[in-house]
Image: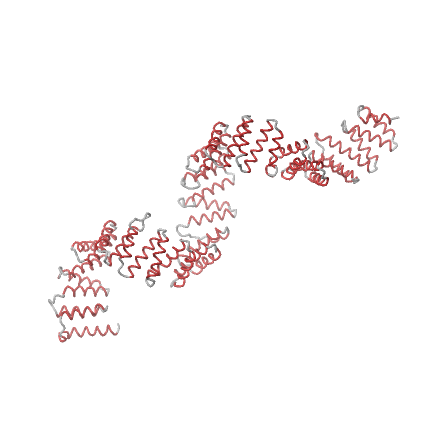
Amino acid sequence: MTAMMRLLTCLGLSLVLIAPAFGLTAEEQLRFADGIYLRGLYEAAVGEYLLLLRDFPGSGHEPAVLYRTGECYRQMGNQAGAERFYKQVEEEHPESPQALRALLRRAEFALADGREELALDELQRLVESRPPPDVAAAAWYYLGLSHVKKGDRAAAEKAFEEVLQSHRDSPHASYAALELTALYSGRRRPDARMTKWFEQAVESAATPSARAEALYRWGDWAFRQGRYQLAADLLQSLLVELPDEPRAREARLASAWSLYYLDRIDEALAAAAGLLDSAQDAETEASAIYLRANALRKLDRDLDALLDYETVVRRYPGTTFANRAAYEIMVTHFKRGDSAKTLAAAPVRPEDGQEADVLWMRAESERLLGRTDAARGRYQELVENYPQSDQAAPALLRLGELAREANRLAEAADLFRRMAHDYPKHEAVAEALQASAVARFRAGDAEGALADWDELLELKAEESVLAEARLQKALVLMELNRSKEAMGLLETVLKNGAEADQIARAHYWRGVLRSGEKKWKAAEEALRASLASAPDAQTEALARLRLVVVLQRQDRMDEAADQVEPLLGDAARVADNPALVEWVVRRRFEQEQDEPALRAALALARHTREAAWRQIGWYWAGVSQTRLGDAAAARAAYEAAVAEPASTREGAEAQLLLAGLELKAGRHDQAAERYAAAAETARGEDSLDLRVRAYFGLGETAEAAKEPERAARHFMSVAVLFDDPEWSPHALFRAGRLFGEAGNTAAQTQAWGELKQRYPNSGFARQLEGLLP
């Protein structure tokens, strides 16, 4: 107890004993008691009020004294004492102004104690008694609160509106307006009157605290509504106008977040710094660091943000922001594509509302790490446990993709279709139906694919999506030999203004259909239209290849070859069509168009998958370069041909040509090896002529190496093993001559005699007429 209070308390006790000796009048005694009351010395004031009642009965001040005595007890927290004096005022002086105020106080007590029925009765009786404006305003306000506690929204609204309409200048008006906003703030679609009520709350605030409360509640509501500009303006006003109010401290966080959501990141960072500097508890510190981390991430400073999130988790584990920060750590790693760290950061117990997000990130990370089974389990858990989440539909798509990758096409199609049916408003419905149709078609279920395409065509989708569906449906119809329906769909694509690549594909498939009908002119027209419609690379290649066939069927071979030329730079197309490219090579070579022949041959050599085709390509490249006069390049091409692990006729020819070059250069051993290799390669029935040439070459090589017996043996092998009208007579002639040079007249006679007998009309037989004895 302070010295002043002790003094006045003693003074009060003395006055009880000697007041009459002072000669104070009743009015002076009342003024003295009121003065003590206004100084907050309620216990001493009670004594003075009781002294007045004792010493001045009938003074006329009884109602005021009794009421103020009750007020003293209320201020001291003695509710029972206060109610006793309030009730005495009502019972002994029911017509006095204080009786109504006493009734209001008792109603307040009843409301605070949860005695809503009693409070309602007394407040209703009070408002019906036409009290003074200040009492009426308070009575209507508390009547509204009583109805709120009873759950009667309509009656509460009526009471609060009465305060605003009839007592707008009352201190209770601001609070009544705020109570009205509280009645409607939880609605998804806010009441149109909310702004009006908040404005009234601010305008009618009678104290700085009331104004701070109104600004804070309005700003907080705007923030929760996502109206961040309004929230920022209101909360900033509170911070600037009333910085010392408790609500100003509470407004700092929402104000900073409003700036963040408005992309005023620099201001948000400054606000976070201020919040951190003024923080008086761990929760506030954590909130400031968490906000700063989010702002840094918006500035693409992910590593700095990550450090802040980790700080929140490490230093403030008991705060509400620790789990949020842990979640954001996971999100940061996920966005950075670090799947392993994403999984490591995954919270064991995600916060409410984040479970589906966490499952999605875990599933995606498992998938990217190649853990397909684990990923599938996460996706399934997400779909089963959180079907209403934003990630449920994408999870179904992922499950379909995983089934498709495992070649479980029917399962994949069912999953894709389920996604489209379970989430009909999802933006990826068309994508899901398309994937389902393609999977069913690949699985051999053409009718099921048609059903998917038909369902897709019923959607209100962009024309490009519908055009694609019509194109794909046409392909299914073609597979089912329903060509007329397919042609109708393709014509629809052309009429409805599809995109350029879709138009090109529609023309291409029309060309395919016309080709199937052997309507070559119509097919050619459609295919040329496809090529003129800016097709994608694949469609262009397919259209050219189909056009080649159509032109060949019309015996327009040069034009057909011209269509292959643009495809020579496409490695995949060359690899898929080696026979066609070889045809172009041969045709260009026969027409002595050596440079075009060389281009086609090199494409065949460089781009085909099979060694045999590469060998053929290198051979034709060599002969083309020979005709172009580039001997070195030709030899390199032949070398490349024989290096391929294949045994084609062209490979044998390349060996023969290389052997000839070695023989011409006098490298007899190398020439012999080449001829022997050529003979080994030319073992097929269609390459016996090359084997003949190889054996004959071995003879020539031995002869050039001054080995007549070996040479004669090789020549005789040609004559004995083969009956070639070109090489056999020549071999017999050369063998006979070598036998003669060696002095083996009998062998010579035998060889030349066989020549005359087997090939009497050959030029070599005629040469013998002057040589035989």
> Measured along the vertical axis of the image, is residue 32 above or below residue 146?
below
Instruction: State left or right for residue 607 relative to residue 693.
Output: left
Q: Is residue 216 left or right of residue 359?
A: left
Q: Quadrant of the C terminus?
A: top right
Question: Residue at the spot x=37%, y=57% of the render?
Answer: 255
Vertical side of 261 occupied by 510: above or below: above
Horizontal and vertical percent position of residue 454: 44, 33
* Closer to us: 439 or 605: 605
Position of the N terminus by quadrant: bottom left
- Residue 459 lies, with reference to residue 90, above or below; the image says above
Count of all numbered marks drawn on residues in the image: 0
Residue 7 on image: x %, y %? 22, 74
271, 90: nearer the viewer: 271
From this view, report whether residue 65 is shown above or below residue 511.
below
Question: Hey, which residue is sitting farthest left in the picture?
Answer: 58
Frontmost residue, 77 versus 373:
77
Q: Position of residue 516 (x, y in %)?
A: 54, 27
Q: Quadrant of residue 707?
A: top right
Residue 81 % position (x, y):
20, 64
The residue lying at 40 percent from left, 63 percent from top is 277
| Residue sitting nearer the eye, 496 or 112 | 496
Q: Is residue 402 left or right of residue 613?
A: left
- The colouring scheme, among rainbow, by chain, secondary structure or one colour, is secondary structure
